[in-house]
Image: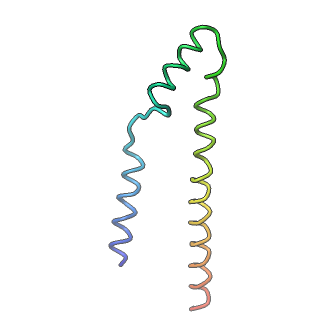
Amino acid sequence: MRKLLFLSFVITIAALLIGTDAEAQCAMCKAVVESNQKHGGGIGAGLNSGILYLMAIPYAMVFGGGYFWYRQLKERAKLES
């Protein structure tokens, strides 16, 4: 069990560290935003920041679930000892 947990942890960390560049928009949206910025528009200034902001919520939920799980395991270990 510990070996499987350790292996899954190593694979997860490796997957997180070995990243590739990704565009946050579809090709059409990117073309429109770039065209708008070239002509002096400001519509694309915060587009990527907005996308990153929206992605923060799922990460916060995963972190919260992991913290809750850790706390439950710690309390269970405390009761058993």
Total number of numbered discs in the rendering: 0
Residue 67 in picture, x, y percent from top left: 60, 66
13 horizontally vs 24: left or right: left
Q: How is colour applied across the structure in the image?
A: rainbow
Name the residue rendered at 58%, 85% in the picture: 76
Q: Nearer the viewer, residue 33 or 67?
A: 33
- Quarter of the rendering containing residue 52: top right
- Quarter of the rendering containing residue 27: top left
Residue 40 in picture, x, y percent from top left: 64, 9
Q: Quadrant of the C terminus?
A: bottom right
Residue 62 in picture, x, y percent from top left: 56, 60
Figure check: 65 above or below 18: below
Figure check: 35 above or below 16: above
Figure check: 20 above or below 70: above
Q: Residue furthest top?
A: 39
Q: Residue furthest bottom?
A: 80
Q: Quadrant of the N terminus?
A: bottom left
Name the residue rendered at 58%, 53% in the picture: 58
Q: Nearer the viewer, residue 77 or 30?
A: 30
Residue 11 in picture, x, y percent from top left: 35, 58
Figure check: 2 above or below 55: below
Q: Nearer the viewer, residue 54 or 81?
A: 54
